[in-house]
Amino acid sequence: MKLNITLPCYNEERILKSNILRVFNFLKENVASDDWQIIIANNQSTDKTGQIGEELEKKFESIKHLEIFQKGKGVAIRESWQRFPADIYIFMDTDLATDLEALPRLIRAVKEEKFNVAIGSRFHPQSKVKRKLVRKIISFSYNLLRKILIGSKITDAPCGFKAVDKKIIQNILPQVKDEQWFFDSELVILAEKGGYKIKEIPIKWEDIREKEDKSKVNTISLSLDYFKKLIKLKKRLKK
């Protein structure tokens, strides 16, 4: 089975090589039975991310560097998924905040258990999560508002660790309008509303950037943007 494993990235020269090789080695040891490709979806980086991506592509046949010429996390994931066809499409954050031990479970949920979508959930009872209190409160508030406005039962739509099958790519991806951070939340909500099978799996998750690197995203402004887009999505779903 062919796997597209996309890592969207923007100015990740400090961690890109080591983390891509971590994913590469993990896949070699734990997902050897599948035909997989790692796609570095370089989203208009201004540092050496592109250079590092090209070097990795030259060295390893199963690593691809894709230059994205429009800014936005959603754009990067969409274009990577469309450019490299597969049976299962996965994306994860480049900082590897989600421990890779959950990756085989994510794949198995789609490959063997026949779920259309598999999601890592930081709110799963068996998950182990390390993050600051303020981020916990913001995340909880977003999930609560999503349940109230949309009626969603998914516990962690924004978690950057997801897998989808061909049906989602064909039927749901074309409906997703957001090209930024709300992209994958919208994808999951539309899949849920469309009656597709979704499984949330437990993960180990740590806010790596809090202790090693400053996040490239302003948490408060991003949260406000999520709330606004939830309201817009609610109006769309009513039509």
Image (cartoon, grey):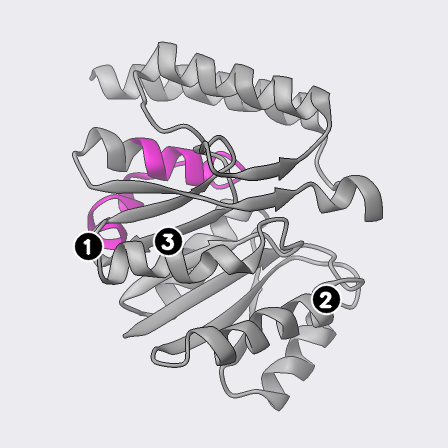
Q: Magenta span has 39?
A: no
Which label sits in the foreground, 2 or 3? 3
Q: Amino acid at mark 2?
A: Thr
Q: CA distance from mark 3 to mark 1?
A: 12 Å
Measured as percent of width and height from the top left, residue 197 is found at 21, 41
Q: Quadrant of the N terminus?
A: bottom left
Where is mark 1, residue-wise?
114
Query: For the residue labelled by badge 2, is the local secondary structure a helix, a strand or a loop?
Result: helix
Residue at 78% in and 39% down: 210
Q: Amino acid at mark 1?
A: Lys
Mark positioned earlier in the residue sequence (3 or 1): 1
Where is mark 2, residue-wise?
49
Observer able to see residue 222: yes
Above or below, 175 against 141 in this view is: below
Residue at 34% in and 80% down: 33
What secondary structure is the stretch in magenta mostly built from?
A: helix
Q: CA distance from mark 2 to mark 1?
A: 36 Å
Q: Quadrant of the C terminus?
A: top left
Left or right of 132 on screen, residue 63:
left
Residue at 32% in and 22% down: 152
Where is mark 3, residue-wise?
163
Q: Magenta span has 169?
A: yes
